[in-house]
Image (spheres, rainbow, N blue to C red):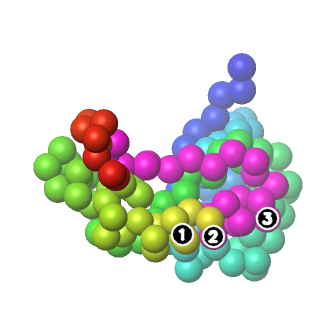
Amino acid sequence: MKIGIMTGFHGPEVVEKFRKMKEMDIHYCQFSSWNPSLWTDENAKMIVDSCRENDVTVDVFWCGWGGPRIWNFYEGQETLGIVPVTYRWQRMQDLMKGAEFACKLGVTKVATHMGYIPENPMSGD
């Protein structure tokens, strides 16, 4: 089994994170980003190059999305994932952009928090 870590992407500091992973003999990670403005060709190249230099493989891209996020069991129902109709269209656009970014990284698996699935089977949502 391949053991790795979860690491976030907030900008160029990721190069140092991959270097530290190599020092710790960790070669696999799940990579997370909640900022679509970072999903550029330039950043993809920087990440791919840094992974290659440090013998790191990104197994999964955890793709975030914009808009409000309240991580609790009350407001979370109304603010998380693509379930809330108010944010659904923009978040689907963010997820598609994230999937394109994952492809540029050579990553074939994308994960996200889809939101709280409605419990009412008669719901249109």
Amino acid at the residue labelled 3: Lys
Indicate whether residue 115 is drawn in magenta. Answer: yes
Magenta stretch encompasses residue 81: no
Would residue 12 appear left or right of 25 to someone viewing this image?
A: left
The quadrant of the image that shows the N terminus is top right
Estimate the x, y position of residue 91 in percent, counting from the top left. 46, 67
Q: Tell me the residue at 71%/66% (across/down).
A: 100
Mark 3 or mark 2, which is nearer to you?
2
The answer to whether residue 115 is left or right of residue 44 is left
Residue 59: give x, y in percent of width and height: 71, 42
- CA gap, disc 3 to disc 1? 15 Å
Other-residue count near label 3 (Cα within 10 Å), few / some / many at <14 / 14–19 / ≥20: some
> Is residue 50 shown to the viewer in this render?
no
Look at label 2 and name its amino acid: Lys
Nearest the camera: 10 or 105? Answer: 105
Q: Which mark is residue 97?
A: 2
**Pointers 3 and 1 in contact (C-beta within 8 Å):** no
Q: Residue furthest left?
A: 74
Q: Quadrant of residue 50?
A: bottom right
Name the residue at 74% across, 39% down: 27
- The kind of secondary structure element at disc 3 is helix
Q: Is residue 59 left or right of residue 122?
A: right
Q: Secondary structure at mark 2?
A: helix
Looking at the rendering, the stretch of residues picked out in magenta corresponds to 97-117
Residue 94, disc: 1
Per the image, the residue denoted by label 3 is 104
Q: Specify few, some or many for label 2: CA neighbours under 10 Å numbering under 14, 14-19, or 20 or more.
A: some
Return the residue nearer the eye: 106 or 6: 106
Q: Earlier in the sequence, mark 3 or mark 2?
A: 2
Q: CA distance from mark 2 to mark 1?
A: 5 Å
Amino acid marked by disc 1: Asp
Q: Mark 2 touching mark 1, by CB under 8 A?
A: yes
